[in-house]
């Protein structure tokens, strides 16, 4: 995978995420973690290589259908103008009150949130609404791009707990983080990405040890 | 000197106000004196050249084909002007040209289709000029605004795309907001006409000795046409540009932020 100006962003990266599985991609800033994630729902396309969903090359799929099968939650919660209801209706314009309430409950919120203005929510609540929005498209896989990095520790643990619940319910989750303590808490499997390449076991171990020594753990 | 011709002496006398502007600039040390003189001289040369050329085009004995040729030149130059004013907007040259072409096609079809004015060189050229002149600024505004919105709110737009929305649905709120921003000044100016300012065409007609009510009805028709033209041009620009900013597989392209 190269950028528009020819800089190589990812090289020889291969990873699988399974249903009921949380695969954590860890690594320093600029390692290519977010780029890798964006290839998963075709917000970016690889300059070489393929991405498969249930055995089908996603390049052959309708991107709009694909993005509803492969949901994405971004680092900074991106709440659309209006109420939580308005936000949910963007994802599922035909959703009724029961469906919207049920998805809110699923992400740990209550029905009264439907009429709350999105901008008035806390960071953790906003991220839960973003997850609820993504869940309304009934995805098989959820791509989570450092979804807790802008949140306080309490909200962070809440979102991690929610991710585990969603995985237990059958979703495959690809979670990107530079927080190694979080990777240890959350991951069923962890891959370390350094300079756009998957680290070998020894490099990964060295990275994890260095990061642990320099105190890169959750506050 | 008559009501319709001020003569060279009248033109020279009007230059006194340019000297007043230069004097004020000098007094306030704005360092704009040279710019004011240059702009005034350039305007004089450009307009006099246009005036002489128009005299040929507007000659009652001249073929109306010359007027249409003039319109084609105006459309071409308006596209280039729009591109120069907003070079950061991708594809603006052809989008601007297309917008201006659409404006002319729609507005002149209405004007001549309903027989509001006769098809003559003296109507085709000035009317087309007014439609294009008013639409250009709004086109630049809407183009810059859309690129700015999609650049500033990239995360929000991509969040919509990531939910499986098509580029049309994902871009709609931002396109709508840009269109409102571009059209409100035109609507406000239409509301204020007569109360706050007397528009140029009407002023010109009254100075040329036309009855005030006749001048007003012509001005009103022109204002309605301008309102329709501006709306048409910004809509063509906004829809064409938003298409231009996405790939076929509904990805938002990389954008450069407009400079101010």
Image (spheres, coloured by chain):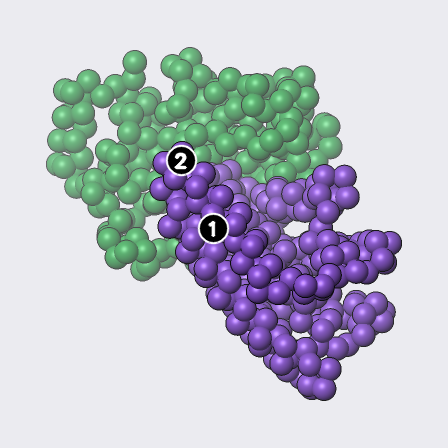
Chain colours: A green, B purple
- Give the residue at x 63% y 38%: A90
Local secondary structure at mark 1 = loop
* Distance in Å between CA atoms under marks 2 and 1: 51 Å
Can residue B106 be spotted in the picture? no
Tags 2 and 1 in contact by the CB under 8 Å rule? no
Position in image of residue A23 (x %, y %): 36, 35
Number of marks drawn: 2
Q: Nearer the viewer, residue A20 or A15?
A: A15
Does A53 sit above or below residue A145?
A: below
Q: Nearer the viewer, residue A217 or A203?
A: A217
- Give the residue at x 61% y 39%: A91
Residue bearing mark 1: B252
Q: Earlier in the sequence, mark 2 or mark 1?
A: 2
Can residue A183 be spotted in the picture? yes
Residue bearing mark 2: B27
Residue A57's quadrant in the figure?
bottom left
Residue B163's quadrant in the figure?
top right
Local secondary structure at mark 2 = helix
Which tag is nearer the camera, tag 2 or tag 1?
A: 2
Quarter occupied by the C terminus of chain B: top left
Residue A81's quadrant in the figure?
top right
Position in image of residue B117 (x %, y %): 81, 70
Does B216 sit above or below residue B154?
A: below
């Amino acid at each position: 995978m190269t950028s528009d100006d020819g800089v190589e962003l990812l090289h020889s990266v291969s990873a699988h995420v399974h249903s009921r599985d949380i695969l954590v991609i860890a690594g320093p800033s600029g390692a290519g973690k977010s780029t890798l994630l964006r290839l998963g729902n075709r917000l970016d396309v690889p300059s070489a290589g393929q991405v498969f969903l249930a055995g089908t090359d996603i390049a052959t799929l309708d991107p709009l259908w694909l993005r509803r099968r492969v949901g994405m939650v971004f680092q900074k919660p991106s709440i659309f103008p209006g109420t939580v209801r308005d936000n949910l209706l963007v994802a599922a314009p035909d959703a009724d009150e029961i469906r919207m309430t049920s998805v809110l409950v699923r992400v740990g919120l209550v029905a009264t949130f439907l009429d709350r203005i999105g901008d008035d929510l806390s960071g953790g609540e906003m991220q839960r609404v973003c997850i609820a929005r993504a869940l309304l498209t009934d995805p098989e896989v959820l791509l989570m791009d450092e979804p807790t990095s802008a949140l306080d520790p309490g909200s962070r643990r809440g979102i991690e707990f929610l991710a585990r619940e969603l995985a237990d319910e059958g979703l495959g989750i690809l979670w990107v983080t530079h927080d190694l303590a979080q990777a240890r808490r959350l991951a069923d499997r962890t891959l370390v990405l350094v300079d756009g390449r998957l680290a070998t076991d020894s490099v990964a171990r060295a990275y994890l040890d260095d990061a642990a020594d320099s105190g890169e753990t959750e506050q | 000197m008559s009501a319709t011709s001020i003569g060279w002496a009248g033109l020279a006398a009007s230059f006194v106000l340019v000297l007043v502007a230069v004097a004020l600039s000098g007094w306030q040390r704005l360092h704009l004196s040279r710019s004011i003189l240059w702009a005034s001289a350039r305007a004089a040369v450009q307009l006099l050249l246009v005036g002489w050329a128009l005299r040929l085009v507007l000659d009652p004995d001249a073929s109306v084909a010359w007027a249409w040729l003039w319109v084609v030149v105006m459309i071409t130059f308006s596209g280039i002007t729009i591109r120069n004013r907003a070079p950061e907007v991708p594809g603006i040259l052809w989008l601007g040209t297309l917008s201006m072409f659409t404006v002319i096609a729609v507005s002149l079809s209405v004007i001549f289709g309903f027989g509001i004015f006769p098809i003559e060189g003296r109507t085709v050229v000035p009317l087309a000029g007014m439609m294009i002149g008013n639409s250009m600024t709004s086109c630049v505004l809407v183009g810059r605004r859309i690129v700015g919105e999609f650049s500033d709110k990239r995360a929000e737009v991509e969040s919509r795309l990531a939910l499986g929305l098509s580029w049309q649905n994902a871009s709609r709120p931002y396109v709508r907001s840009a269109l409102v921003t571009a059209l409100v000044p035109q609507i406000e100016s239409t509301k204020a006409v007569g109360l706050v300012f007397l528009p140029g065409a009407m002023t010109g007609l009254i100075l040329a000795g036309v009855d005030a009510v006749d001048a007003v009805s012509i001005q009103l028709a022109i204002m309605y046409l301008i309102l329709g033209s501006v709306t048409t041009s910004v809509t063509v620009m906004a829809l064409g540009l938003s298409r231009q900013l996405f790939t076929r597989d509904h990805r938002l392209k990389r954008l450069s932020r407009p400079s101010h």
